[in-house]
Image (cartoon, coloured by chain):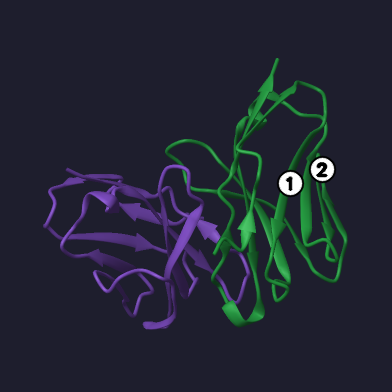
Amino acid sequence: DQQVKQNSPSLSVQEGRISILNCDYTNSMFDYFLWYKKYPAEGPTFLISISSIKDKNEDGRFTVFLNKSAKHLSLHIVPSQPGDSAVYFCAASSMEYGNKLVFGAGTILRVKS
Amino acid sequence: KAGVTQTPRYLIKTRGQQVTLSCSPISGHRSVSWYQQTPGQGLQFLFEYFSETQRNKGNFPGRFSGRQFSNSRSEMNVSTLELGDSALYLCASSLGERIGYTFGSGTRLTVV
């Protein structure tokens, strides 16, 4: 049972344009969401998070939007840079899970220069 | 400030053998969680240890086990290795509940 889904395995974007990565979840108990970026042979690096009491969180070029009614979140990267090329994972947690994160399968982002 | 350190970085084992992986958390972090990443899959939660006690466990067979020491370092063990256990094993430490969750670089295990 996949509780967190990233339906796009890959995304290709031109440098300078916006990258939009999407994530859907099924468990209504999830109340905290995170995005991680991962390069090959490295561990995931935390990017940005959002609590379910908010619908938007911004940090520099990265903005995460949460639509609780649709159980959907998205990560916007503006402007996209070649160094952003990596695998992006969406993760979710709930109070009952404590420190357990439930991850999506990831989206490969390629930013072309 | 040192990050999360995992050793070894790479490991090749034969089917049927057992393996032990090590994780040293960030200083002051008392929670250590383990994840398995296989091709095409997201990270799958294995278990979490806090103050030497297993606090949470994922859906993995009993061949996967772990422990945490008094200095918060953690080890995970996989017995009777199968080809399907080939994966990147990641450890994450955190300061508290969902605070400062930081991953190590992982151990790449290949079972032949």
**Camera-side residue: B18 or A4?**
A4
In the picture, the quarter occupied by the C terminus of chain A is top right
Residue where numbered disc 2 is placed? A60
Secondary structure, mark 1, is: strand
Are there few (<14), some (14-19), or many (20+) residues within 10 Å of tag 1?
Answer: many
Question: Residue A94, position in %: x, y?
Answer: 66, 75
In the picture, the quarter occupied by the N terminus of chain A is bottom right
Quarter of the image for residue A84 reads top right
State the separation of the CA atoms marked 1 and 2: 19 Å
Question: Residue B23, position in %: x, y?
Answer: 35, 61
Q: Who comes first in sequence, dot 1 or dot 2?
A: 1
| Looking at the image, residue B71 lies above or below residue A112 | below
Residue at 82% across, 30% down: A79
Task: Identify the disc placed on residue A36.
Answer: none
Question: Residue A34, position in %: x, y?
Answer: 68, 58
Residue at 35% across, 75% down: B71
Q: Are marks 1 and 2 in contact (CB under 8 Å)?
A: no
At label 1, the amino acid type is Asn
Residue where numbered disc 1 is placed? A22
Q: Is residue B65 left or right of residue B102?
A: left
Secondary structure, mark 2, is: loop
Are the numbered discs 1 and 2 placed on the same chain, yes or no? yes
Q: Which chain is green?
A: A
Chain B shade in the render: purple
Between label 1 and label 2, give the one nearer the viewer: 1
Q: Chain of mark 1?
A: A
